[in-house]
Image (cartoon, rainbow, N blue to C red):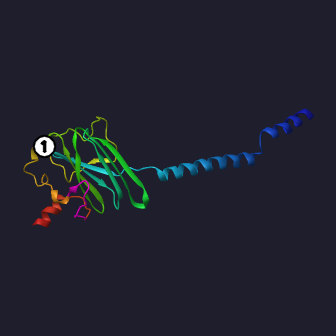
Amino acid sequence: PGTHSSIFDSSSLFFPEPDRRFSIFRSHYRHRLSNFVSGCKNMSHNPEVLWAQRSDKVYLTVALPDSKDISVKCEPQGLFSFSAIGAQGKLFEFSLELYGKIVPEFRKNVGLRNIIFSIQKEERSWWPRLLKSEDKPAPYIKVDWNKWCDEDEEGNSDTASDDESAFVDEDGESSDDDGLLYLPDLEKARNS
């Protein structure tokens, strides 16, 4: 009996009391959780990106209200990169490897709720998809059905006609600042 108590007493030197073990565990994971949360604040987010095409261009609509510090890089091999600061100072960014080659200059319309880009294709053709990869696109990339036009409807559809006056060159500013997505039915009603 005496040896068991001495072994028990000496083992308490190696293993802290239960309350002490729990507080060490709790403080360790509280610190790790705090680091994770602060890291999440600095992480970038992906804005919703809507796309449509014509035989000669691609439209990208980035849904990002109150965006600031917009930075865009457009490379001839089809790489399109976007970053901006959104509401509450969050960083939003994405890069797309487009299906085909493009003209590096682009036109944009910056509104209150979104930024619309018109990107010229290097060769006039209909792409089978937006991205070069055949994998399913990221969930933030969606078809813009308000701007969509089928290949056989391009020349004779009201949807196919776009208002190029709303766009400006890549370094300029847009005069159209309503920031609303293009809605063909509303356009028809407004013109009536």
Q: Seen in the image, is 19 located left or right of residue 109? A: right
Residue 41 makes an appearance in the image: yes
The picture places residue 33, in percent across and down from the top left corner, at: 57, 49
For the point 14% across and 66% down, the residue is: 190
- The residue located at (59%, 47%) in the rendering is 32
**Horizontal and vertical percent for residue 64?**
33, 57
Q: Quick one: 16 or 52, which is closer to the camera?
A: 52
Q: Identity of the amino acid at label 1?
A: Glu
Q: Is disc 1 placed on a helix, strand or loop?
A: helix
Crowding near pointer 1: few (<14 within 10 Å), some, many (20+)? some
Q: Quadrant of residue 12?
A: top right
- Asked if residue 45 is positioned above or below residue 180 in the image, the reply reads above
Over which residues does the magenta segment extend? 167-177
Q: Is residue 7 left or right of residue 22?
A: right
Please provide percent x and percent y for residue 5: 88, 37
Give the position of the N terminus as an image quadrant.
top right
Q: Who's the residue at 19% across and 43% down the image?
A: 121
Mark 1 = which residue? 151
Q: Residue furthest left?
A: 156
Residue 179 within the magenta-colored segment of the rendering = no
Front residue of this view, candidates 71 and 189: 71
Tally the marks. 1
Image quarter in which the C terminus is found: bottom left
The residue located at (34%, 44%) in the rendering is: 95
Horizontal placement of 41 versus 58: left or right? right
Q: Magenta span: helix, strand or loop, mainly?
A: loop
| Residue 163 visible, this angle | no
Looking at this rendering, what residue extends furthest in the front direction? 171
Instruction: Judge whether 116 appears above or below 78 on screen.
Output: below
- Quadrant assignment, res 102: top left
